[in-house]
Amino acid sequence: TNNNMSQKVKLNWRYAFGEIVLIFIGISLAVSFDNWNQKRNKAKIQELILMEIRSDLTQDTLLLNAAIATSDKQMRSIDFMVKYLEENRPYSDTVSHILSNILMFPRIQFITAGYQTLKATDITLIENQPLRRDIVKYYEYMHPRVLQSMGDVEFEFKTYWTSWILENIID
């Protein structure tokens, strides 16, 4: 019976060791699958956010192109008005139309939905560091500078040029 008991203990240890190995393998597989799934989900979220940022940048480009076109029209109108005034031409309806071009300033409201989503999620979601740095630079540094520059030009124009134009037109 003692020998029989010794064999049962040996079998129980082998059985227990086998169970531990199976549990370890099962846990390792579960952790590996979970890590793989998290990476896959992170990649999907990154792709969706980058697609939204791309869409925002496309819209920003359209807005900036429209603002540039309006500014070009404004500059041509100013040139026309200066020449018109220098030549002492009489008032005509053209002057009113040109003045409306001069006094209308383009305003831009950049689209930042994708970037705001990225910031709210986790900016390190973008694994490509140079891309992440460029995105942050664009939204945190360039947007405010462009808006400030446009505001400065508008302030300068309204402060100095508008009064000059109106004085010369009244005369």
Image: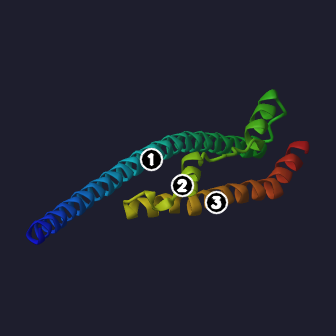
Q: Mark 2 or mark 1, which has the lower sequence index? A: 1
Q: Which mark is residue 121?
A: 2
Q: Residue at x 51, y 63 (%)?
A: 137
| Contact flag, marks 1 and 3 (Cβ < 8 Å) | no
| Contact flag, marks 2 and 1 (Cβ < 8 Å) | yes
Q: Mark 1 or mark 3, which has the lower sequence index? A: 1
| Kind of residue at badge 2 | Thr
Cα distance in 3D space between marks 1 and 3 = 27 Å
Cα distance in 3D space between marks 3 and 2 = 22 Å
Element type at marker 2?
helix
Local crowd at mark 3 within 10 Å, few (<14), some, or many (≥20)? few
Image position of 90 with respect to 20: above or below: above
Image position of 9 with respect to 149: above or below: below
Is the N terminus in the top left, top right, bottom left or bottom right quadrant?
A: bottom left
The answer to whether residue 3 is left or right of residue 126 is: left
Question: Along the line of sight, which residue is nearer the eye, 82 or 69?
Answer: 69
Res 132 quadrant in image: bottom left
| Kind of residue at badge 3 | Pro
Judging by the rendered image, the residue that carries numbered circle 1 is 45
Judging by the rendered image, the residue that carries numbered circle 3 is 144
